[in-house]
Amino acid sequence: MNLGNEYLKIVQDRFQSIKSLGDKTISQLSEKDIHWKYNETSDSVSIVVKHLSGNMISRWSDFLTTDGEKASRNRDQEFVDDKTSKQEMIFIWEKGWNILLDTLKGLENQDLLKKITIRGEHHTVIEAIERQMAHYSYHVGQIVYIGKLIKDVNWETLSISIGKSEEYLQYKLEKHRS
């Protein structure tokens, strides 16, 4: 087993898992819901999606060869809710994730210690991956929390329901025994 290749497999799975939480939240939201904001200084799901996608496209395009903050990126515009439709928002969401996941699939063990730059700051590829993992987890957590606020009692949980922890544990143990 090669440690670098195993790491790359694990981070691809982790990013997919983070994306899945966002997917499952977005699927519960209406056209109106994606633009809901707690207050004027808060972000809507639509805004968070635009920001995530803009970051992913900038960071992961030409990942090994150009700075992760592309001149073509307009970060400030990502925080303007221009009332995109839910379908358009999902297209934006998928575009960013596809670039990220395709780039990760193309990386190899020998790439992990290469140096790349983000805003002129040097990082190993491993550092850059971990930096983005934390950033995307943070923002998908925001999306989930906003979804929970909006859906209230109609929220369909994305994890183990309250009061079902023991039942879930037994299910997992039985599954692994067979």
Image: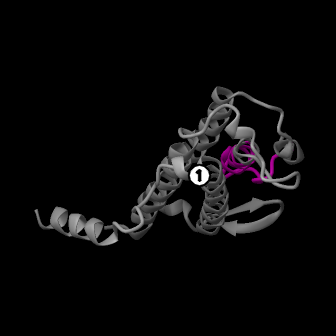
Decide which of 39, 53 is in the foreground and name it: 39
Quadrant position of residue 36: top right
- Element type at marker 1? helix
How many marks the image carries: the answer is 1
The image shows residue 107 at horizontal and vertical percentages of 52, 53
- The furthest residue to the front: 153
Q: Is residue 166 above or below residue 9?
A: below
State how the image is colored. one colour
Q: Is residue 55 above or below residue 131?
A: above
Decide which of 82, 130 is in the foreground and name it: 82
Residue range of the region highlighted in magenta in the rendering: 50-71
Q: Is residue 47 above or below residue 136?
A: above
The image shows residue 154 at horizontal and vertical percentages of 52, 47
Residue at the (84%, 53%) spot, across then down:
39
Task: Inspect the magenta stretch and tell me whether residue 123 lies in it.
Answer: no
Quadrant position of residue 172: bottom left
Residue identified by numbered label 1: 152
Residue at the (56%, 48%) spot, across then down:
22
The image shows residue 24 at horizontal and vertical percentages of 50, 45
Residue at the (29%, 72%) spot, across then down:
166
